[in-house]
Amino acid sequence: MLSIKDLHASINGKEILKGFGLEVKPGEVHAIMGPNGTGKSTLANILAGKQDYDVTEGTVTFQGKDLLDMAPEERAREGVFLAFQYPVEIPGVSIANFMKASLNEVRKHRDLQPLDAVEFLKVMKEKMRFVEIDEKLMRRAVNEGFSGGEKKRNEIFQMAMLEPTLSILDETDSGLDIDALRIVANGVNKLKNENNAFIVITHYQRLLDYIVPDFVHVMYNGRIVKSGGKELALELEAKGYDWIKQEVDATV
Amino acid sequence: MNAIHPTAQAFYEQWEQLEPTQTPMGIARKPAMDSFAQLGIPTIRHEDWKYTNVAAQFKAGLTDITNITSNTVDANHLNLFPFLKANRLVFVNGHFSPTLSDVIDAAEGLVIGSLALYNELGHMALRDNYNTLANNDKEAFSALNTAFAQDGAFIYVPAKTEVAHPVIIVHVTTEGLQGVINSRSLIVTGRSSRLDVIESHQYLGNDTALGNQLLEIVVGENGLVNYHKIMTDGNIGKHVGNLVAKQGNDSRFNTYVVNLAGQLVRNNMVVDIDGKNSEAGFYGLYSLDGASQVDNHVTVKHNEPHCESHQLFKGLLDDKSTGVFNGRIFVKQDAQKTNAFQSNKTILLSEQANTYTKPQLEIFADDVKCSHGATMGQIDQTMVFYLRARGLDEAQARAMLNQAFAADVIEKITLEPLKEWLLNQLTQQLTR
Ligand SMILES: Nc1ncnc2c1ncn2[C@@H]1O[C@H](COP(=O)(O)OP(=O)(O)O)[C@@H](O)[C@H]1O
Ligand SMILES: [Mg+2]
């Protein structure tokens, strides 16, 4: 589904990704862990189409198409979804209004009829229950004055609405209490099926008690330095990242 | 008398031909003409007219044409706000059109009609209030208006009367006229009354006269007046509007000014809060493109203690358009416990758009809360990206963000159908 090969990218002349590679197949959940500043969000933003980065080398193909060639909205319509690490506040735009426009664009791309107001409201309410969001939040402006937990749940709500093929969660668990974490994880687990895939970027192993990954990758200094099964996450939790850094730095 | 200002000469000669009358309007003409003869048309060297070159419009030697134009027009070319159940007063080139007007509310003593008519009839409230607020000594356009205006709206709301439906005042300027059309209105509301006014300016065609309008509003004690000035329909030509208002004790007065177009528009608003425990609100949106130019000047005078005023003006400026905001807050020494707030926010959608903003705070009381702020900038790219990452294309994302920015002002309007209609007009503008 997704194939990233030897990706190099920089921002303001500073190289952040240094030969990143990853293969994701339908039905898989990949966890990417790594210390702060290692390039995890950079990777996520590049996949979503943020234009601040220069991709200097490498390729990204998504369902056989060149992802890097597409505008951000085309990627979203094709089924790529990024749950942002820091969701932006958008004053004056209600979530309901925003999601209606968004869902109908995605539906149009999939040759589906746009939903009318009544149908949309029905879908929205159902998905809100799914992520246990208060209905009142829907009439408020996107993320404006939301708590950290509300912002993250709003991202998962949007994911549930758009039913993406590939979801990338960028530290959606950071700063969440255990209840909010469980809601986010439940959201992912219920959406998961054999046709879609998830890349879960996290700093903490805790999330992986709830979302069981098929693969765990350790990212350091702009690339994957170690891959394994879910037991790798436990090892990282116990030992921290220093041994990885030492191992990698020793071989350079 | 001193020499007549060159820009006033032609007007003066014309004015001498007017038939003198002993009505309130007639009596006010001479001192006003004398004042205008001294002041002349302000140029950009005049601090208050720095960014709005109205004098250039007068180069061609404009004269007053209020007296020579007809009041006939095809109603199909007008927006009479059919979605609102309302009283309607329509003025064509400064003259009342009885056939297009329609008054549905009736109450003991309530007047909704033509100023010229009630001037002739000698209505008491008109005699007592006409030309008491206009600043003809200093404001050239105010003096010019008083000297020449023939007609406009007259609304008198007696004490304890709530006018059930809004009064829509439509000012129409027909095509192919050169000159100045002066129109004059007066609104007097009594104690514990309520009135909603919607004033719409409609220009039929590109090549239209300059409209010079003066509106005086007396807001009675414990009363509420909501005044909406709507300049959204098609072409909005050259316009100078002076609103002068006075508020009594415990009163509320809100002004909403929406410009979605304007060749050259100047909206002056001067409100004297002359009563304790009163509130004044000023909300303005100017969403412009092409070479449009809209200049809003607000002066709120806090003359009494325990009053509150809010000014919120937002500009969305595309192409080569220009937005000007000048907000003055004046707090008298006795006006303790005043709360006065002012905000002007502008988004520039093009590199050629211009915005000028100037707050002026003159505060002579010590126990007051006053704040003002101005921001200007481009549309936020991180927001655009967030929306695109959810499938909206760039144009959709921008329209949605612009709409949200501008709608904030329209949302303040309490007349629900008008608010919905304006939001819809705004959407149409931003998505075309
Ligand atoms: N706009 C920028 N200009 C320069 N450096 C940046 C910019 N944005 C991020 N970086 C740098 O890129 C590196 C990777 O950041 P990021 O991808 O956010 O890491 P992570 O998500 O793994 O914590 C960091 O060293 C950060 O300082
Ligand atoms: Mg990050």
Image (cartoon, rainbow, N blue to C red):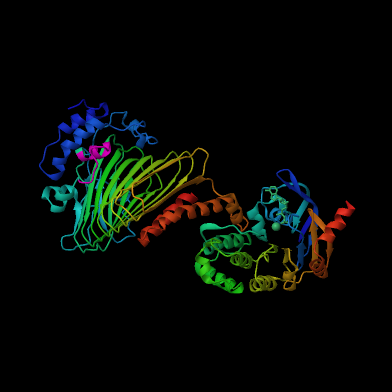
Left or right of A15? Residue B121 is left
Q: Is residue B15 above or below residue A110?
A: above
In the rendered image, residue B137 lying in the magenta stretch gets the answer yes
Residue situated in front as seen by the camera: B421 or A203: A203
Q: Nearer the viewer, residue A228 or A245?
A: A245
Residue beneath the point at 44% across and 52% down: B426
Q: Is residue B346 visible?
A: no
Position in image of residue A216 (x %, y %):
80, 65
Magenta run includes residue B78: no
Corner quadrant of residue A232? bottom right
Quadrant where the image shows the N terminus of chain B: top left
Between B425 and B158, the residue placed more toward the observer is: B158
Q: Is residue A125 above or below residue B199?
A: below
Find the magenta span and give its range: B132-146
The image position of residue A105, as x and y in percent, is: 59, 59
Q: Is residue B410 visible?
A: yes
The percent coordinates of residue A201 (x first, y second) are 73, 62
Residue at the image point whose x is 80% and y is 55% from the top: A223
Which residue is painted at 18% across and 63% down in the image? B107
User: As drawn, which residue projects farthest toward the front?
Assistant: B366
Looking at the rendering, the quadrant in which ligand 2 lies is bottom right
A58 sits to left or right of B315 = right
Q: Is residue B127 left or right of residue A98?
A: left
- In this view, which residue lies farthest toward the left? B22
The x, y position of residue A191, in whole percent, is 68, 71
